[in-house]
Amino acid sequence: MSQPIDPTLFPFFNPAGIAVIGASTTPTKLGFGVARNLVRSGYTGAIHFVNPRGDRLLERPLYPTVADVPDPVDLAVVIVPAPHAAATLAEIGRRGIRAAIIASGGFRETGPEGAALEAECLRVAGEFGIRLIGPNCVGLINTHLPLDTTFLPPPGPTPGDIAFISHSGAICAAVTDWARGQGFGLSHLISLGNQIDVRETDTLAPMAADPHTKVITLYLEGIRDGRRFVRVAREVSRHKPIIALKVGRYESGRRAVAGHTGALAGQESAFNAAFRRAGVIRANTVEELFDWAKALAWCPPAAGPEVAVLTNAGGPGVTAADALESCGLRLATLRPETEAALRAILPADANTHNPVDMLAAATAGQYAESLRLLLDDPNVHSVMVILPPPPMESAGGVARVLIPIIYATVKPVVVALMGERMIQEAVEYFRAARVPEYRFPERAAAALAVLTERAGKVRAADFDVERPPLDDVRPDEARRVLDACRAAAGDAAGFLPYEVVDALLAAYGIPTPRAAIAATAAEAVDLAWQVGFPVALKIASPDIVHKTEAGGVLLNLSGPDAVKKGFADIMSSARAAVPEARIDGVHVQRMVTAGQEVIIGAVHDPQFETIVMFGSGGIEVEGLRDVEFALAPLNEAEAAGLLERTWAGRRLAGFRNLPPADRAAVLDIIRRLGQLAADFPELAEIELNPVRVLPEGEGAVAVDARARFTSSQTP
Amino acid sequence: MSQPIDPTLFPFFNPAGIAVIGASTTPTKLGFGVARNLVRSGYTGAIHFVNPRGDRLLERPLYPTVADVPDPVDLAVVIVPAPHAAATLAEIGRRGIRAAIIASGGFRETGPEGAALEAECLRVAGEFGIRLIGPNCVGLINTHLPLDTTFLPPPGPTPGDIAFISHSGAICAAVTDWARGQGFGLSHLISLGNQIDVRETDTLAPMAADPHTKVITLYLEGIRDGRRFVRVAREVSRHKPIIALKVGRYESGRRAVAGHTGALAGQESAFNAAFRRAGVIRANTVEELFDWAKALAWCPPAAGPEVAVLTNAGGPGVTAADALESCGLRLATLRPETEAALRAILPADANTHNPVDMLAAATAGQYAESLRLLLDDPNVHSVMVILPPPPMESAGGVARVLIPIIYATVKPVVVALMGERMIQEAVEYFRAARVPEYRFPERAAAALAVLTERAGKVRAADFDVERPPLDDVRPDEARRVLDACRAAAGDAAGFLPYEVVDALLAAYGIPTPRAAIAATAAEAVDLAWQVGFPVALKIASPDIVHKTEAGGVLLNLSGPDAVKKGFADIMSSARAAVPEARIDGVHVQRMVTAGQEVIIGAVHDPQFETIVMFGSGGIEVEGLRDVEFALAPLNEAEAAGLLERTWAGRRLAGFRNLPPADRAAVLDIIRRLGQLAADFPELAEIELNPVRVLPEGEGAVAVDARARFTSSQTP
């Protein structure tokens, strides 16, 4: 299933023998830590230690050089000072080892000198065909093999079903320690460090293939080769959930941009679009990452959003109901039979409507019987059990009777255990039984929402959608137009003349009003008669991007006199506003005043290539921020998702006296613009604003458009 | 300082003697639990137990009746079955006790019979002048007096500086248990139950006056008499922070509404507006409630939003920076002197820019010295110290050297301790030293944000603002207009004719276009000449609320022929759209087409009286949801806050080619409409949409308006 695993990575995940280069007998050194962990881990392959000083370590010989290490050996762990790393890699290569983890620091993270050392390592690795993890990393833990190449202070993580892949070593150390206290185990821990070779994307297929891993969690500081990540992650996540915590928002400064799309398409929008395409669930904190991973690893899928809440007190029930609603879930409406059966076993004062409140005197038996009834109700897709310190019972006793019922059901059950000391026994029972427990209802609700969303995606076969290419676009024509323009512009970065943009749009079948350039007022009047009144006049200048602000736009001119005067006004306003501007004349366009106004744009993203934006158009785009993003090219369902997630898109269905607009025409333009932008990555930005969407069946027209070349240095 | 304490409440907070009515010798009964906790608590006043069966309990006599209880006694704790509660209260009253906690359940929460028992208790309490807490509550804990009237299983909370006041008993039980594990204590725990007498608002002044309480936390399921809560909470929170967790969102169904304001002004908007006015900080989860309370109780105020982050690893530093940014805080720019001093004590590879990364080998001494340097930098307002399991040091050792420095500073320092077992010693040191510690940087950042916000409010003397009444409004005139209208409408609920609304607005000095009703096309043409072309025509009918949808609006008619035809068109469209509508004719108004469009509305809220809404106007109000709310009446600063929190408001300052609009005129209309709606609570809803805001100095005009009477049954 899923992606094939690159065989050169096998030694990282199931090595026959490991050599620790830089193993040390000094207990405070990392080289001792690695040796200790490897031996302690119970790794059953061959373990070899290398240190030029010889001697023995942990009842094993210390070989003076790698060359002395006997077979079998197919993985090296390197903890030598950075300046010696490249030479060590060469020795490793000569010994025939083709996989190495460089744990040592002192490379790129320390500055240019370190970066040079790192480059040298990569060169040597290339020479010998050695795959590298690191440098500046913690290494690998595989709790099931078992294997531990890290120097983290023991004990390591308990065996579990969550793989954790991290760009940060410190986060690995923290999570390893924290996970124990939180009662979940890990299948794998992979610390990637500076990623000169093996990156997060490379680890996905091995984790997908690992039978012990149920959920893959990622701590990401950024992604190089974003499209490859999306492709692989999408293939993996159709079978196994991936949850990512992506940090580094604060560092992602805005690009130099002129259009709305560029201004709004920050790195975060791109990541959100990429994660959506890849089916990756995005967490916002480490706690969410593992709250959700536990639920996905341990619970069956939720068949829908209807949740039953079982509680022994009103307050927590209200809290749970609020939390469910704010996560997009709903309180299930119980069947009358279920409510009747609950009434039969609960006191008269109990509330048998959902949230079901059994009252404070609820016994373990009532908890058990009520849970069974809720799970039997076909209107219930999942259950949240709330357990504050029960006044009349031990929480542990309640846990003991609930666990067998939870095992027997195909519906997810999560537990909100409220308290600390008085619920500790129950916490331990639930953890041992792998039932997700959370301290308060809010976190339990969020976990149920993730379960529900994931199941919905799998059910809807979201991962199977295809992205058929548009067959009625003319890339050759667009290429010709672009090349001619680029040649004329002397290959400089900058905005394209409107005629060129119009021609590109025509090549991709995107409707625009008919337009032509008038160099004189008389020409403008002639053209206005040709395209038909009323007309719009717009300044034609490669140097004036915000035409309206420059006084370069006049709308709705209904006769020749107005056009004549308008031509003169525009020319003088534009000259006054941007004195140095090259002015080619004035565009004369048929006015399109009807229809709803939207914006459709695309930008080239350094990590994820082409990103499409859709939303409320006009000049207030940044103010309203009613925009959404998707990777391009995109299919109709993905384009429809942009409409559903924005008010501008929902409004197209009609609103008060606004008639339903031509949604199909908008979807078509979104796809066409996405394809155009994806086909021509030299377009840094292309934006249709506004697009006027006419009533159903009448189409949509890109009333104005602009596009910008990337500088050819940084395509 | 702050609010005076109602002397009738004194016995709850410092009783001379307590009688437990229903004290039991059976250890599984709540009546035993109360007796046990009271004795265990160390309460130094007189403790009396009452049970008709006599005997002894915990080495004290069991008096058969309350009448037998000797002096001193001024507080009764009642744990008798609900049907006996009223009779017990009468005995308590006859004994001269004037304060009682009814812990028993079986009242309103169980249905109409229980509600009747509750009403009878209230009646008896009124007869004797007894103040009541409960019924159906856990009772009171005062850890410093000490006093514990609850039946919660011991141990109770440790003494601390956070008061917790709760509408839910189960949440009290959970928080009491959980707080111990989280390492913070409580000063008071007050469980209010069904609140037939003493409510959350009554407890605020006693907590404000309590020297042991530094922060007041509330768990609220709703508030009756919202205005009183706002008044008292505002007075209290100017001296002592109040944090509230308000649940019950999912229960707050929408009211029957016709306007945009009513549709958007849900209970949550009202609570947000009320909490803002009251200076109450709103938490979303129990964890946030106490995360923030700890910080406010233990840290000095933050002088500004510039935060320094001190870490020994890059990943957590990035996470912290993200979290700070998303909380509205900023990474401080360190002074060159600080960076130089850091470089002198840290390794060459360390990052001395903020976030300061000392690298994994950081020693306790480096942590200490770096923290000192950061705190000495005047650019730094607060510090987040991040402590993953340090590879080379014990986290406990680091904590030990940091604590004296944190004690000595006047700037807040919070700690993100990442891990579990390896950081446990440090956790305990920090907790004992009352330094707020959080498991990950995200929660630490949120706490710093709350500290910063609170300090900002106190500094800005936000609590001292006055709300001077508007002196140029004519409530008598408005009263006359309204009464006449109400009389004409036969006192029915419903929409007011436009002329009436216009007259109300005139009485409160809110500008509208001149308008008059034409009954015939000829009259319409005459009126149009009077008000001046172009004009708008709008159907005049008390039965047509959404005029545009009914084809009842024509805009921008520039000559008499257009008006004549328009009159006929509107009359026939409106008749076709709403055949049963009473039609008074057509309003003829001068057109106001210029200016930015906003909405200003007000609704009457059942809990918080009048609420004002401001935002993006037009017909898409609900779609764009660019609206904000405030309690009315409001002063100019509060009105300005509405503008700052909406795009419609920020846009008034000018945007691209939109010139700056008359912000002052908008503030004026907001205040006038708020005053009008507050003065006439029979107006369920009054809404100006759109208000057209002209360029600076030219004013703003309410182009359309509507208002609705409450039905006189439910004012």
Image (cartoon, coloured by chain):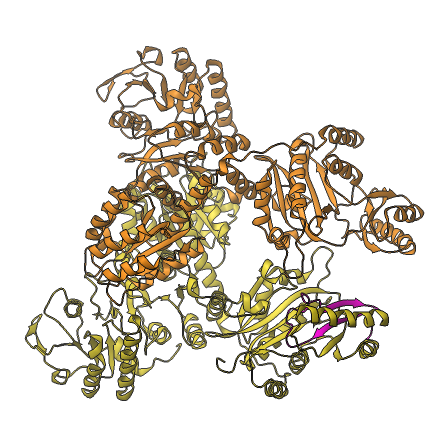
Chain colours: A orange, B yellow
Q: Is residue A636 above or below residue B216?
A: above
Q: In this view, does A668 lie to the left or right of B133?
A: right
Q: Quadrant of residue A569?
A: bottom right
The answer to whether residue A584 of the structure is visible from this angle is: yes
The C terminus of chain A lies in quadrant: top right
Residue at image position (81%, 68%) is B557
Q: In this view, does B92 lie to the left or right of A462?
A: left
Q: Where is residue B280 in the image (x, y as percent from the top left)?
A: 44, 67
Residue at image position (54%, 65%) is B264
- Magenta segment: does it hold B534? yes
Residue at image position (70%, 52%) is A695
- In depth, the one of B533 and B414 nearer the eye is B533
Count of numbered badges drawn on the protein = 0
Q: Quadrant of residue B648?
A: bottom right
Q: Is residue B428 left or right of residue A446?
A: left
Q: Position of residue B443 (x, y in %)?
A: 40, 51
- In depth, the one of B119 and B234 nearer the eye is B119
Residue at the farthest right position: A522
- In depth, the one of A379 and A387 nearer the eye is A379
Q: Position of residue B432 (x, y in %)?
A: 27, 55
- Magenta segment: does it hold A692? no
The N terminus of chain A lies in quadrant: top left
Q: Where is residue B455 in the image (x, y as percent from the top left)?
A: 46, 63
- In depth, the one of A604 and A234 nearer the eye is A234
The span picked out in magenta is: B532-558
The answer to whether residue B361 of the structure is visible from this angle is: no
